[in-house]
Amino acid sequence: MKDSHGDRLALFVRDMVYAKKQVRGSGVDLTAASIRRLAGKGSVDFGGGEWTAAEARELEPQKRAPEDEYGWWELEPGQYLLRYNEKLAFPPPCTALIVPAQRLLLAGGWHAAVATDGQEPVAVLCVGQGGLRMKQNARVSTLVAANPQE
């Protein structure tokens, strides 16, 4: 049986929450580890000497019941910095894309496609006017091959 794109990508993904659910035919689902509310402006210049990250405030997930293992983020409309549990380790010159999962889109959140060559990927999560509830470790994005080879 031929390996799927997801099986091949999974070779370069560490710290998956539950690989049996995350590795799919077309890619690997990425899960929410932390969310920060963007609260101030950053700076971007040509050379990078004047670059600064935007100010962001860490949000703590809240458990609905004391016995719950994981909590929920109650997100108001706006932009957030989304960090994933998974770490990537692609050999050069490999590149992959991180795209929003359909479930995230239908729940009222989205992020732009992010090209990554590895490390600790992040995305700017945008939440629509109705807000969004997101549970810790929710599968919110999918890692897909930028140029899959058969």
Image (tube, grey):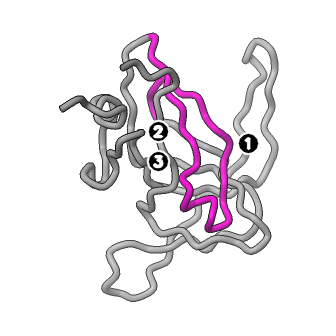
For badge 1, the amino acid type reads: Ala
Q: As displayed, is residue 100 above or below residue 138?
A: above
Tell me the crowding category of disc 1: few under 14, some 14 to 19, or many 20 or more residues within 10 angstroms, Cα based: some
112 or 26: nearer the eye? 26
The residue at the point 81 percent across, 43 percent down is 41
Q: Nearer the viewer, residue 115 or 87?
A: 115
Q: Which residue lies furthest to the left in this view?
A: 1
Q: Which of marks 2 and 3 is in front?
A: 2
Q: Mark 3 points at which residue?
A: 84
Q: Residue at x 81, y 20 (%)?
A: 45
Q: Do the residues labelled 2 and 1 touch (CB within 8 Å)?
A: no
The residue singled out by tag 2 in the image is 143
Quadrant assignment for the N terminus: top left
The residue identified by callout 1 is 54
Give the magenta-colored segment's residue range: 93-120
Q: Residue 16: horizontal and vertical position, in percent? A: 31, 47
Of discs 2 and 1, which sits in the foreground? Answer: 2
